[in-house]
Every structure is written in structure tokens, then in C-alpha cells.
Image (cartoon, coloured by chain):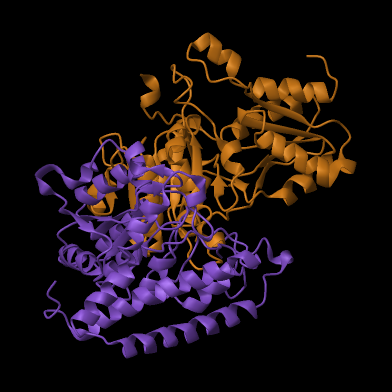
Chain colours: A purple, B orange
Amino acid sequence: MDLKKYPHKLLVKLYFDMLRIRKVQLHIESLYHLDEMKTPIHLSIGQEAIAVGVCANLRQNDYISSSHRSHGHYLAKGGDLKALIAELYCRETGCSRGRGGSMHLVDTSVGHMGSSSIVGGGIPIGTGLGLAIQMKAEDRISVVFFGDGAAEEGVLYESINFAILKKLPVVFVYENNNFAVCSRVSARQAGEIIFHKTPNDAMPSQTVNGNSVMEVYEATQQAVTRARQKAGPSFIECKTYRIRGHAGAGSDEKLGYRTAEEICEWEAKCPVRTFSGLLLRNGVLNETEIQVMQETIDCEIDEAFRFAQSSPLPKPEDVTKYLFCD
Amino acid sequence: MPWTKNKAEVNEPDYYFESSENVRRLSYSEAIREALDQALGMDQRVFIMGQGVDDPSGMFGTTLNLHKKYGSQRVFDTPLAENALTGITTGAAMGGMRPVYFHNRPDFLFLAMDQLVNHASKWFYMFGGAVNVPIVLWACIGRGWGSAAQHSQALQGLFMHIPGLKLIMPSTCYDSKGLMLAAIADNNPVLIIEHRLNFRNKGCVPEEPYRVPIGKGIIRKKGKDITFVAISHMVTEAYSAAEELSREGIEAEIIDLRTLRPLDEEIILNSVSKTGRLLIADCGWKTGGITAEISAMVAEKGFELLKAPIRRVACPDVPTPSGFTLEEGFYVGSNDILNTAREIFQIRA
């Protein structure tokens, strides 16, 4: 791959953001057994290239909507790390004030309007954000992240039909990680998803290697440009693999629905490591610079965890707070 | 089919006005249409969508020709995709709009339950107050002419169960306008359930925009002997029953709840503290419905006020039948309220 056409700053940012998301998730995972983060985590280890490759094309005021597996989307869009960790620790300082937990992240200051843990639930909401943009003639777009399970929900068809009908500034990012809990996509889908071929090419579609941040970045660039030009929605399928189990920490190979060899094969395609290799070979970064990045991120993570652990918990008597907005 | 036409021919009781001679009368659908017209005119964020809102019948007349006045960007027909469209209104509301989404029948709301219950109603709480969802959903209960089991469900009991969702059921032309304007101005998801039979009514409706407060019931008739709590068109039924009872020397107080959630508990308990007797009338099913909830609330908070057991008038727990003889067996009205009240006073008809 020829990296020369890309600004140095962009390449460094793509790597830094992926590394940061990976390290945050590994740190969460390493402390999860202490049972202090009392919330079901859904790690996206191995899928960092998608969140980062997509969000690198977005501006602060662009919207994203996502799912239960959303730590990566939240961080890639610029969501506050301290507020994320505090949310996992169920603290009042969490992004959702300890009312949402790991599956319900939000940071409106960067256009993240909240993630849903009902599979497919965020799809129409992101589409509706696109409708608001169009009706208010705003200069921004909406990106919808969803997985292969959500791709089977009727609400995806309903939303895409509407987005095409109204030419909404929406990019649908289909993150195909192969699994819904322990069920393989091949057991659930008859073949390629139908949205790769829409009538009259009303919605351009691409399939990319979701473990290649540059492929994701390029595909998204086209889709985002189209949305900014108010030409309508686009669809991007990113093929990837869920390295960890559906929920919780650690490998789930003992469950027996997939082999250790299969997981190893995909670990070899790690998006973070393959990209660092590429950057090192091309002289974009050197080992020392990567080491500095690691240390910077470690410091930030330590600080975020200290902040979370020392933050106040919501009071039981506040259980009815935030039911209605005044 | 007679029920597809809007014949506003009955004057509703003039609850609000001492003298109604100089007050303008509108039909029920005209009152709602005026609210929408004024909301669209006053607030650029408001838009109206739903299957058939721009068709020749204009959703029972409530949205008639508004697309011609405000354009098809702001008043538009939708695909038959209730779940996604509910999510789309939710997203649009988060993005700064004020959507009003029309369904001609509550039965179709079942297709939207995921977005309405799992998403819109929870968003403000689930994210600790970070994002609110100011949407209005509207649906009208069908009745008669063989509407049957899937076109006449009165689902208020089910929707009253959902925290985070405001639930409104108006009974008068005045309230249908004022509560619509209040719902659009509200910062939360609001479901308005109308009843087909209300659309026969004409009533006094001031021309200027006004809001009826959400969460406040109103006493439609004062009385000292028994409290009738009713909603939607059951208020009119309760009124007829109360007039007959009055001739028998019993004065019923009628409470029109107008909002089911938040429930105006105070107005119910205050009335029961005066009358000591309670009859609750609903146009929906009895089991797990609003009559059950209100009974439980009064039993919990006002048991010592009661001189007689609470009684309920509601539809039997079966799907709505289609044939008109069976409809007669299914629906409840003023006679049922009257007879139940007589039983409370142990009067033989």
C-alpha cells in the first residue's frame, strides 16, 4: 500500500487512536475480574480499524449512533475517556451518570447521541438524526454503526428505504464480525446482504477489509463526501472478526463453538499490529515514537481509572431522577 | 362505511363555559387540526408525518390540507414502517426537531413497540438526562362497523405501564386542541390516544393557541355521593349516567383524567375523600388495565376514605368481535355505569 499520498499527521492519528482504543479495552479487561465494574462489557478487540477509519473522516458536530459493542465508536468519535471509565464503574461522573452502563454511552459534545443495546435499535435513530440535519439544512452528517446481527433486523430495511427515499445524509456502516453471541453469520444469513445492490444504484455500497484501517478510511471518505454533498446515503460492509467472547473478559474458546486455531488466524490479522508494521516499514513511525505513544496512553488510562474509582456513586434516593425532562 | 366519515353532529356538554352562546364551536377534528396548524405556524421545528396525513381524508380531518399550507417537507406521508419511523422521529427529535407522528389506529403501535418503549421512553433516563426526546405520537381507537380485533384496540393500560412515556386521552374538543399544543411543547415523548366516538362531537374551542396542562385531571360535574373516574369518550358516558342518577337523588362527581401518565392522583383522592365511593370507567380491557391501576392506587392511598368497594366498568377480556350483536356484548357505556352505580347504592333498577 502506498502511504505517501496521505498526510503524516493522519497516519499517526489513525494508529494512535487504534492503539488507544485497544489499550483501554485491555485495561478494562485486566481489571474486570475484580467485579468493580458492575456492568456487562462487550469488547471490540480486533475491530478497532472500523471505528477509527470511519471517525477519522468525521467532524466534531457529525453524529454517530451505535450499539452495545460501542467503546471503540465512542472513543474514536472523541468521547471523553474519563466519563467512559466512570460509567463502567457506575459513577455519577459517568457519561450517563451511572444510569446507562457499558452498553449506553453518550457524549453529545462530539455528536454521540447515545448507544442502544437492542440489536439494530440505533439504526433508525441515526437515520432520524439525518432527517433533522436535512430539515434544518445543517452542514453535518450522521453515521450509523451496526453489526451482523442487526443486519438481520427488519428495522434496517425500513431505515434504509426511508434514507434512500429522502436522500438523507447518512452512512450505514455494517460491521460484520461474524458472530451474534455464539451464532455464526453463515447460520443466520443466506448470502451477501441485499443492500449491496439497491435499485438504480440509489445507495452506493462497498465491501472492505474491516481489519485494514486504510481501506475503511478510503471507503468512508467516499461515502462521507457523498453525504456532505447531500447526494444521499451510502453503505459500507466492513468484514472483521470478534476476537473476544460476546460479553465479558477473555477468550471464550472453551465454549467450543470455534477453535483456538481460528482465533489465532484472526489475531494474526490484528488491525493495530498490521498497521504499525506498515508504518514502521514505510518509515512513518519508529519504535521510539511508538513507545512514547504507549506511555502517553498508559498515563491517560491510569488517570481515567483513578478518576472513575474516586468518583461518587449515585445515591439510591436519586433513582427517580431523570425520568422526565422539564 | 359510515364510520369513515366525520359527522360532527353532537354538541358535547359545555363543561368549560358558563355561557356558550358567544363561543366558537369546532368539530373534534377541526380542533386538533387547528392545534397542528398553529404549532406548524409558530415553530419551525414542528413537522407532521404518518401514513395518509396528506391524503384526501387527512387523518379523519385532523391534518387536512396542512401539506398544502406548509409544504411536503413539513407534512408528509411515510412508508408503512412503524418501528423505524418511530426511531426516525426519535432521532429527528434528538437533532432538534419536534415531530408529530400520526397512526390511524393504536393497533399499529405494536409494530413500533421496540422504538417507543425500548428507546424513546428510556433515552432521557438511560443517559442521565443528556438527551431528551420531544416526540408526539397520535393514534385513534376505532369502534363499530366491524372494526374487529385488530382495528379497535384500546391499549392505554399497556402504555400506562411504561415509565418515561406521557399518556394523554382527551375527551373534549377544547382539550384535544390544548393537549395537542401541550404535547408538542413538552420535552418528552407523549402518546395521545384518541377515540373514534369523540369525533362525533362539536365543542367550544377558543381560536387563540392555548395549552391544557399535562398531568392534570378536571372535575366535569360536581357531586357528593360517588366519584366517577373516566377517560376519553367514557366521560360522556359517565355524564349521561350521572344525569340519570341525579334524577334518582344521587349526585355523582365526574373526574375526566385527561392524562393517564403522569396520573393526577390528588384529584381522585380528594374526590373520594368527599364521596367515599368510586367507580372507574374505561373503554379498554379490565385485567391489568387503567381501572386496575387506579383501583390499586386508591386502595393503597385512600382505603380509609371508602364507604363501599371500588367498582370498575371496562370491556371484557376478549378480543373485539366484529359482528354488531357481539359488539353490543363487548362495549360498555352509560347503562353499565348507571347499573354499577345503582349496585353500589343497592338500588334495584
Q: Is residue B122 found left or right of A220 in the rendered image?
A: right
> In the rendered image, is residue B43 in sight?
no
For the C terminus of chain B, give its image quadrant.
top right
Q: Position of residue B162 (x, y in %)?
A: 59, 46
Q: Quadrant of residue A248?
A: bottom right
Residue at 47% across, 52% down: A246
For the N terminus of chain B, give its image quadrant.
top left
Q: Position of residue A202 (x, y in %)?
A: 14, 49
Q: Position of residue A4 (x, y in %)?
A: 12, 81
Residue at 68% across, 50% down: B264
Q: Is residue B179 above or below residue A100?
A: above
> In the rendered image, is residue B321 in sight?
yes
Task: State the count of labels.
Answer: 0
Q: Position of residue B325 (x, y in %)?
A: 53, 9
Q: Is residue A97 found left or right of B74 in the rendered image?
A: right
Q: Is residue B82 found left or right of A59 in the rendered image?
A: right
Outermost residue toward the left in this view = A200
